[in-house]
Image (cartoon, rainbow, N blue to C red):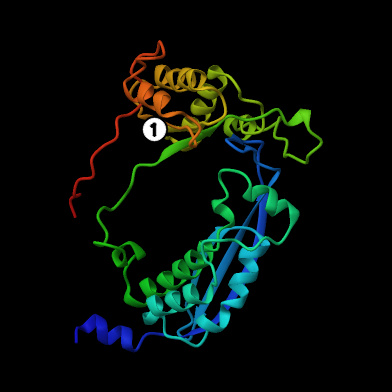
Amino acid sequence: MSAQQAALGGSPVVTGMRVIPVAGQDSMLLNLCGAHGPYFTRNLVILTDNAGRTGVGEVPGGEGIRQTLERSRPLVEGRPIGLYNAIIGDIRRSLADAARHRVTSAAEAAILRQPHEINLRADNVLTAVEAALLDLLGQFLGVPVAALLGAGQQRESVRMLAYLFYVGDRRKTDLDYPVESQAADGWLRLRQEAALTPAAIARQAEAAVERYGFKDFKLKGGVMDGAAEMEAVTAIKQRFPDGRVTLDPNGAWSLRQSHCARAGGMCWPMPRTLAAPRRATPAAR
């Protein structure tokens, strides 16, 4: 038996599991299914163990997910964190149909008819508990969670990108979207203002660089037609020629449109703009 296996055999025991729904303000960000509402929701799972440590998991909100997490508490509490795989297996088996969500409201039923219903899937229940258990286990072993996954931690840092959205005109609704028109910070202000043109998207990129220092960018597409979205990422590339720019069409493009973009604008009169995908290569440890 290895030292790690011996340690896991004596690992701390989960003494409590709390499920906490939270909400925060959101902008009128556009995507394939329409627009984000003025509030987003999340479900937090907070585990405590008998060593006094706390582990946290976060998944999309929704009453169905919250209720299922609550029902899972007896499968988690009182068990050693070293048996996290067995705990997750028991929760998976307890879900009569983990891949299907049990609708709890008319609003959820409407969402499930849309192409992107992933946020309501019961799989999120597994993710929330697993993340919190791994958080506790990493603290117990004195290693980052990355060291417990797959082939282990591969790098010390990861280069992040600015996540840009088309933004609808909140003034055309009576919904309670936040207003930051007087904010000195350009990012906070522009995230609340309509952004439907390539120039507006480029300004968003500038504001993200000013606030966070990003060098690379991603635009959430599936809102305009393919040619218009290519114009938007081209505007970003022209403003930041050394940056890597990616576009997520959200599954809205046809196969032909995707091939056009991959070919660097063969079907649309655009210069090569999108960052080429990179093959996975082992990173230096």
**Residue at 56% of width from left, 84% of height from top?**
74
Q: How many marks?
A: 1
Q: Quadrant of residue 101?
A: bottom right
**Figure quadrant of the N terminus:** bottom left
Please give the residue where the numbered disc 1 appears in the rendered image.
216
Q: Foreground residue, 173 or 55?
A: 173
- Relative to residue 214, is residue 146 depicted above or below? below
Residue 81's image quarter?
bottom left
Taking the image as shown, residue 131 lies to the left or right of residue 113, namely left
Kindly state the secondary structure of the residue where label 1 is placed: strand
Decide: is 277 above or below 147. Answer: above
Image position of 233 (left or right of 197): left
State the quadrant of the C terminus: bottom left
Instruction: Give 69 or 258, whichever is nearer the viewer.
Output: 258
Task: Give percent across and percent down for residue 31.
Answer: 58, 35
Instruction: Please tell me which residue is depicted at 32% across the width and 83% down the height of the picture.
Output: 8
- x%, y% of residue 72? 56, 77
